[in-house]
Each structure stands twice: as structure tokens, then as C-alpha cells.
Image: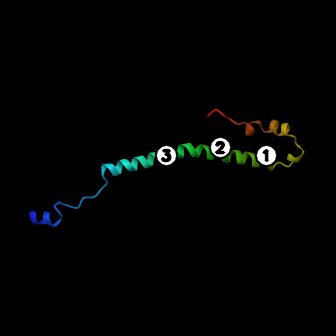
Amino acid sequence: MRAKQLANGGRVGKQRGITVIGMLLLIIVIAFVALIAMKVVPMYIQLFTVKSTIESIRKEPQLAQMSTTDIQKRHPEALRYRLCR
């Protein structure tokens, strides 16, 4: 048995796995990516919502004859911009 341990470099078996420092670094990286995602994803959702709203208003056939106030009166829920988030 002792000869086998010496042949393996003093180890009984081949060790596998992640160290505590490796696990900590992995958790830090995952937390950083999650933080960035929580900051960026709402902005993209708002961007695509505004784009689709503008596109749907732009496709209206009477748009050329409408004034700005007429457009705002016709689509109040679509043009509402919420600053409090």
C-alpha cells in the first residue's frame, strides 16, 4: 500500500473537483453577470415596446392627415411614458 501511495505522488487517489477559491470566483462571476442583466434587460424591453408602439402608429393610413394632438388623443395609453420605475 505504501508503495502505491509513493507512486501516486503521495496521494491515495486522484482528486477531482473545484476548490473553495474556484467556487468563490465562480459565484462572483455569476453574480456580476446577473447584476448587469438586471440593469440592461429592462432598458431593452422598454426600447422594443416603444419601437413597436411607434411602428403600429406609423402604419395607420390616416397618419399623414392627423396632427400631433390628434395622434396623442387617439393613442393615449401607447404614448404614455412612465418615468417612475
Residue 75 visible, this angle? yes
Task: Locate residue 12: give its quadrant.
Answer: bottom left
Residue 1 visible, this angle? no
Q: Nearer the viewer, residue 59 or 83?
A: 83
**Residue 70: % across, % down:** 85, 38
**Residue 77: % across, % down:** 74, 37
What's the residue at 35%, 49% (across, down)?
23
Judging from the image, what secondary structure is the residue with disc 2 in?
Answer: helix
Q: CA distance from mark 2 to mark 3?
A: 19 Å
Q: CA distance from mark 1 to mark 3?
A: 35 Å
In front: label 1 or label 2? 2
Residue 69, label in figure: none
The residue beneath circle 2 is 46
**CB contact under 8 Å: marks 1 and 3:** no
The residue beneath circle 1 is 57
What's the residue at 18%, 65% (across, down)?
8
The residue beneath circle 3 is 34
Nearer the N terminus, badge 1 or badge 2?
2
Q: Is residue 5 left or right of residue 77?
A: left
Task: Locate residue 43: give its quadrant.
Answer: top right
Q: What quarter of the picture does the N terminus occupy?
A: bottom left
